[in-house]
Image (cartoon, rainbow, N blue to C red):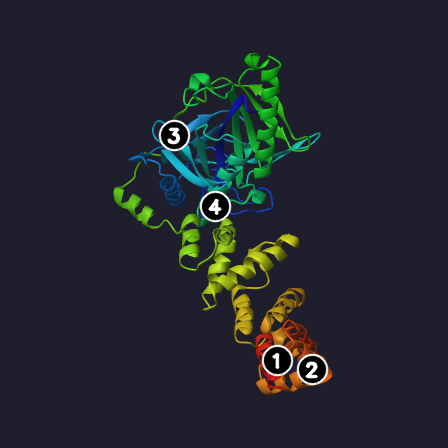
Amino acid sequence: MDKYKVLIGLEMHCEISETNTKVFSGARNTFSEEPNSNIRPVDMGFPGTLPVVNKEAVRKALMASMILNCQQPEYLYFERKNYYYPDLPKGYQITQETKPAPVGIYGSLTFDFNGQEKTIRINNIHLEEDAASTDHFSSYSTIDYNRAGVPLLELVTEPDLHSAEEAVAFLETMRSVYQYAGISEADSKKGQIRCDVNVSIMGYDLDEMDPNNWGTKIEIKNVNSFGGVRDAINYEIERQIEAKENGTYDQMEQQTRRFDEETGTTIYMRSKVDAIDYKYFVEPNIPKLKISKDWLEKIRSEIPELAPERKLKYMEQYGLSDYDATILVKEKNVSDYYEQTIKDNVDPKEVSNWITSIVLGYLNKNNLLIETFFLTPKMLSSLIQLVNEGKISSKQAKEVFYKSLEEEKEPIKIVEASGMKQIGSSDEILKVIEEVLTEQPQGVEQYKAGRTNIVDFLVGQVMKKTKGQANPAMARSMMIEEIEKR
């Protein structure tokens, strides 16, 4: 592997969500498991129908372009990309090419990879309509036109990535950008993210900035998961290195392959020259649109706080570690849950400890999502407050947490119903301490002989007698005070 350098470029497709309607038709832009339920005549390419541009889809596309440090165009054009396939009823796709310019060109994205900053050049990002989804079976195929016409962002990188792990880190960062900016749910389970991967290898010592040194580019189409992207790249690297080693690489043609998840291999589909003739021309039914500077500035001002900004805030304002802050911001819904919880004047560090260890541990173990989690941020903050007020111990709080989820009851109601409230009365605790010291007279002698760790055992007896309800800190200080009196 050290003999070769890997060049990877990505074409990431992400559906824009929450635009009410599709990009060029009035059909609902919502996920539905019922096939062909979100369609209109425009989506089906019926004669006499005309596309109308969804302004919100354009706004979100321009916002993505800004976040990626791209140049935005003065005028917005759409074009026809002509090719026949059953998932394109019109026989063409309404999209954008680089000339005239799409919503964004020549940008960059910087992200953290293994503790180091990595910057990837963005060739372009453009807005287009998605095609219908097809499922192929042994003797027939089905087509669902719900996806046809859904606004789709295609992001094209330069070949600046050098490993499968880097590629996945880039895609995870982009998913985070789309989610935090409210551009897309970016949910791969709903088919909202797909990726084409371009892989080639070259001599390790050659200059990768010179395209003449690049190897044969192999395109892997429509990989539907980040795990699939990782596995497809790793397989393709090994396949190409093997071809290089056995002398067949130079005869390899530029080609398109598909990734087979069952076998973990890429499979030849067709040869591909540098430019397929899609006969692009400007879409005649959509006039060019002037993008005003005022609108661009308004969109820029509406870019919300993204994951890097939240992470910095968590570290600088709340005193969280880099590790904990990274875990909290990785998924927007987790970060939102954290922010909602700390609104109730509970310590941000305590909340972080609960979420990063107990809450996420429970969700991962049970394969649940935090957005459907029974314990709301308000419930979690109230549970933490019960501990801080000395009404229950931290050990009891964990018991309440799991019982709350098991019975689907609010933590406060479980505490009240079970009589679990912590004993914070000094008189009650003192009475139990006196009982323990009467039963364990040798404990006093051992303490005074220098075995001060006997206190832990004696406090344990107090906790046992009170069924864990005594305030541990109070019991400890009072135990030492009472021993020293004797």
Disc 1 marks a residue whose amino acid type is: Met
Marks 2 and 3, how far apart at CA: 87 Å
Which label's residue is closer to the chain start, 2 or 1? 2
Image quadrant where residue 241 sits: top right
Q: Are marks 4 and 1 in contact (CB under 8 Å)?
A: no
Marks 1 and 3, how far apart at CA: 84 Å
Which label's residue is closer to the chain start, 3 or 4? 4
Classed neighbour count for the residue bearing mark 4: other residues with Cα under 10 Å, few (<14), some (14–19), many (≥20): many
Seen from the viewer's position, the closer of residues 47 and 145 is 145
Marks 3 and 4, how far apart at CA: 32 Å
Q: Residue beneath label 1, please?
A: 479
Q: Secondary structure at mark 4?
A: helix
Q: Residue beneath label 3, please?
A: 283
Q: Secondary structure at mark 1?
A: helix
Q: Are marks 3 and 4 in contact (CB under 8 Å)?
A: no
Which dot, 4 or 1, sits closer to the camera?
1
